[in-house]
Image: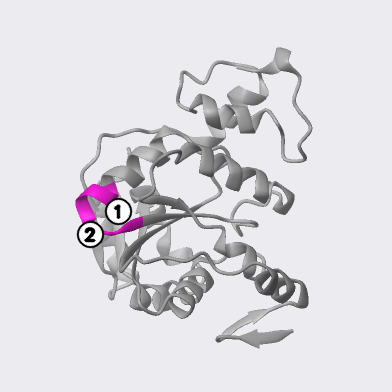
């Protein structure tokens, strides 16, 4: 293994990062939005757009995770496919960007490593991290959670079953240096897992997944089109 800019990489990671230059940015304030996005849906889009409007950042960066540690069923070989779906979701919104930066990092994809890398690669940018109240509730269990809270403030959106004030108070019992801002948004309790199950069964997704995202979904992760008769 080698070390570059303070982050450990395998040889294959280094080859990938050297062959693909970092995306350029003129942004001074950026809100990071991580996830598997399998599939991305209107809940993700609404959350990012409202956070952009309410925080005053220059851009929101969607960071699809190649191999999330908490979701063993998400295969690394679906990464390019999920990146393409996110790009389709963000169509014609230049302030919302797909940034597949975690492709450069070791697996699995830990948020602490991603934030450290972003701060190293883009030293002129002030970063914040966007997440739902359900993810905030589990933040103390994340790898390097204490260090993460010292590196970046969080922006939180409401989720059903996770009252913001109570959730923040409970998390601060374990992470006293937590910095949190709250955005106002309607409760859109949309689950990628639920949508994926409906898609796999050929059921209607009720336009919760935009048509342009579905066009990518039906191509499949290996570019092999699914049976048209199975489409929702």
> Which residue is depicted at the point 71% across and 49% down?
75
Side of 45 where 103 appears, left or right: right
Q: Which residue is mark 2?
A: 181
> Which residue is depicted at the point 55% across and 66% down?
110
Viewer can see residue 74: no
Viewer can see residue 80: yes
> Which residue is depicted at the point 51% across and 75% down?
117
Q: Gap in Å between the C-alphas at discs 2 and 1?
A: 6 Å
Question: What crowding class fits label 1: few (fewer than 14 Cα within 10 Å), some (14-19), or many (20 or more)?
Answer: many
Looking at the image, residue 146 lies above or below residue 155: below
> Which residue is depicted at the point 29% across and 59% down?
58
In which image quadrant can residue 187 be found? top left
In which image quadrant can residue 153 be found? bottom left
- Rendering coords of residue 221 (x, y %): 72, 40
The boundaries of the magenta stretch are 51-59
- Rendering coords of residue 88 (x, y %): 52, 38
Q: Secondary structure at mark 1?
A: strand
Closest to the observer, 4 or 188: 4
- Rendering coords of residue 93 (x, y %): 38, 43
Looking at the image, residue 92 lies above or below residue 110: above
Q: Which residue is mark 1?
A: 156
């Amino acid at each position: 293994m080698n070390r570059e800019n303070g982050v450990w990489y395998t040889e294959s990671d280094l080859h990938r990062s050297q062959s693909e230059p970092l995306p350029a940015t003129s942004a001074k304030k950026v809100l990071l939005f991580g996830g598997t996005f399998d599939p991305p849906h209107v809940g993700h889009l609404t959350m990012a757009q409202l956070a952009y409007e309410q925080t005053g950042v220059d851009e929101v960066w969607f960071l699809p995770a190649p191999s999330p540690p908490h979701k063993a069923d998400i295969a690394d070989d679906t990464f390019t496919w999920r990146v393409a779906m996110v790009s389709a979701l963000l169509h014609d919104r230049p302030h919302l960007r797909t940034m597949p930066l975690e492709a450069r990092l070791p697996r699995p994809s830990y948020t602490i490593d991603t934030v450290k890398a972003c701060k190293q690669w883009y030293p002129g940018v002030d970063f914040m991290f966007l997440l739902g109240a359900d993810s905030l509730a589990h933040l103390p269990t994340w790898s390097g959670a204490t260090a993460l809270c010292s590196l970046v403030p969080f922006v939180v959106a409401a989720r059903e079953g996770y009252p913001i004030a109570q959730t923040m108070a409970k998390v601060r019992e374990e992470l006293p240096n937590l910095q949190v801002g709250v955005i106002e948004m309607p409760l859109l309790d949309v689950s990628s897992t639920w949508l994926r199950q409906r898609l796999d069964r050929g059921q209607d997704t009720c336009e919760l997944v935009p048509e342009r995202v579905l066009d990518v979904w039906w191509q499949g992760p290996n570019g092999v089109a699914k049976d048209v008769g199975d489409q929702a």
